[in-house]
Image: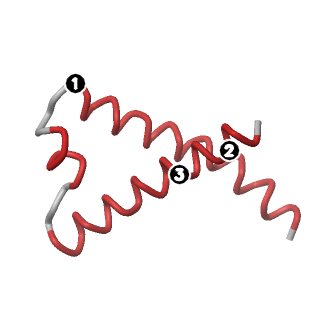
Amino acid sequence: MKVLNCVALTIAIIGAINWGLIGFFDFNLVSGIFGDATAFTRVIYALVGLSGLYMISLYGRACADA
C-alpha cells in the first residue's frame, strides 16, 4: 500500500505543477510533451484525477494523526 501512496502522491504533484504552469505561464506541460487531445494525454489527465481522488483518503488519515 505504501508504494501506491507514493505513486499517487507523485502523480498528484505532477498534476499540481502542470496546473501551476498553466496558471502562471499559460503553458500546458502535458500537452507540450504528448500533444493536444491525444489518447495518451487523456490517460495522463485521468491518472492525475484518480490520484487526486485517492489523495482524499490520505488527507483524512494525515489529519487524524495530527
Circle number at residue 5: 2
Q: Residue at x 62, y 49 (%)?
A: 55
Crowding at mark 2 (Cα within 10 Å: few <14, some 14-19, many 20+): few
Q: Which amino acid type is shown beneath numbered disc 1?
A: Ala
Residue type at tag 3: Thr
Upstream in sequence: badge 2 or badge 3: 2
User: Where the C terminus falls, by quadrant?
Assistant: bottom right
Give the number of the disc on residue 58: none
Residue 49 % position (x, y): 44, 41
Please tell me whether mark 3 sits on a helix, a strand or a loop.
helix
Secondary structure beneath disc 2?
A: helix
Q: Residue at x 22, y 75 (%)?
A: 24
Q: What separation in Å lies between label 2 and label 1 (alpha carbons)?
A: 25 Å
Instruction: State the residue at coordinates (17%, 45%).
Output: 31
In the rendered structure, the answer to whether residue 45 lies left or right of residue 37 reads: right
The answer to whether residue 47 is left or right of residue 56 is: left
Q: Quadrant of the N terminus?
A: top right
Determine contact: label 1, label 3, CB under 8 Å.
Answer: no
Circle 1 Cα neighbour tier, 10 Å, few/some/many (<14 / 14–19 / ≥20)? few
Q: Position of residue 25 (x, y in %)?
A: 16, 72
Q: Quadrant of residue 36?
A: top left
* Residue that numbered label 1 is attached to: 39
Q: Which residue is mark 3?
A: 10
Q: CA distance from mark 1 to mark 3?
A: 21 Å
The residue most toward the top is: 39
| 45 shown above or below 11 | above
What's the colour scheme?
Answer: secondary structure
Disc 2 to disc 1: CB gap under 8 Å? no
